[in-house]
């Protein structure tokens, strides 16, 4: 099974580049199958990692950045791949 972890944060206005740099420096305890970093208007950064694991597996997550870098708590979601029946 493939599980995707999504991590999304919104930087303090004008600090999107700092948040993006912070995300790029973060390492996880394990190596995901794939990792993608995206950005969006309003200084938002999204990280999606794909893991070969069960949905409820204990997987490494990115931490919360320094409170002076973000405007709110990080949003996190977990999804599993769906195959055609």
Image: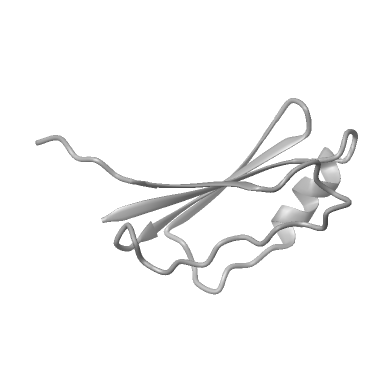
Image position of 14 (left or right of 81)? right
Q: Position of residue 57 (x, y in %)?
A: 36, 66
Q: Residue furthest bottom?
A: 29
Q: Nearer the viewer, residue 5 or 32?
A: 5
Q: Is residue 42 above or below residue 59?
A: above
Q: Tell me residue 53's x, y (percent).
A: 32, 63
* Drawn side of residue 82 relative to residue 28, left or right: left
Residue at the image point whose x is 15% and y is 35% from the top: 84
Give the residue drawn at x 78%, y 55%.
Answer: 22
Q: Which of 81 and 32 lies nearest the eye of the viewer?
A: 81
Q: Position of residue 8 (x, y in %)?
A: 63, 43
Q: Residue at x 86, y 39 (%)?
A: 12
Residue 27 left/right relative to 65: left
Q: Residue 9's spot in the image, x, y percent?
A: 69, 43
Res 17 quadrant in image: top right
The N terminus sits in image quarter:
bottom left
Q: Quadrant of the C terminus?
A: top left
Q: Is residue 18 left or right of residue 59?
A: right
Q: In the rendered view, tell whether residue 72 sits above or below residue 25.
A: above
Render colour scheme: one colour
Query: Residue, x 19% and y 40% (percent of image)?
Result: 83
Above or below: residue 10 compared with residue 52: above
Looking at the image, the residue that sits furthest to the left is: 85
With respect to residue 69, does 57 lie above or below?
Answer: below
Residue lying farthest top? 41
């Amino acid at each position: 099974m493939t599980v995707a972890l999504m991590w999304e944060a919104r930087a303090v206005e004008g600090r999107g580049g700092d948040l993006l740099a912070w995300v790029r420096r973060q390492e996880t305890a394990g190596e995901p199958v794939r990792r993608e970093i995206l950005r969006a208007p309003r200084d938002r950064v999204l990280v999606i990692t794909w893991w070969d694991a069960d949905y409820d597996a204990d997987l490494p997550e990115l931490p919360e950045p320094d409170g002076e870098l973000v405007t709110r708590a990080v949003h996190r979601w977990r999804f599993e791949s769906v195959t055609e029946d």
